[in-house]
Amino acid sequence: MDAVTDSVVTAITLAGNEDALARLADELHAEQVFAEFLSVAVPYHSARMDPIKDELLTSLEDLKRTRRVCRCT
């Protein structure tokens, strides 16, 4: 397994109550497990987005998908 695949398998992102997450981070640090808080204003990957889901989807309706081509050398 390469490093990129390995990091995907072993890394997770949690969203929730900040105090609970801080306690979990403290426990992980005590066990010498790497844990850090991400600097994001909105946890787009979580159920905490539910209150603004409809508004967000409506605001994105007019966006058009484009195909990007990577010219890697």
Image (cartoon, helix red, strand yellow):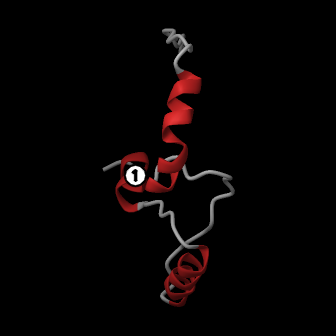
User: In the image, what residue occupies the spot 54% across and 76% down?
Assistant: 21
Q: Is residue 64 above or below residue 10?
A: above
Q: Dot 1, crowdedness within 10 Å: few (<14), some or many (≥20)?
A: few
Q: Is residue 46 left or right of residue 9?
A: right
The number of numbered badges drawn on the structure is 1
The residue most toward the left is: 1
Q: Is residue 73 above or below residue 39?
A: above
Q: Nearer the viewer, residue 4 or 39?
A: 39
Residue 42 coordinates in the image, percent (x, y): 62, 51
Residue 56 coordinates in the image, percent (x, y): 56, 34
Q: Is residue 4 above or below residue 13?
A: above
The residue pinned by badge 1 equals: 8
For mark 1, give the secondary structure. Answer: helix
User: In the image, what residue occupies the spot 60% across and 74% down?
Assistant: 18
Indicate the quadrant containing the C terminus: top left, top right, bottom left or bottom right: top right
Q: Is residue 17 left or right of residue 6?
A: right
Q: Nearer the viewer, residue 16 or 8?
A: 16
Q: Nearer the viewer, residue 73 or 59?
A: 59
Identify which amino acid the numbered label 1 is placed on.
Val
Q: Is residue 17 above or below residue 11?
A: below
Residue 52 coordinates in the image, percent (x, y): 55, 43
Residue 55 coordinates in the image, percent (x, y): 56, 34
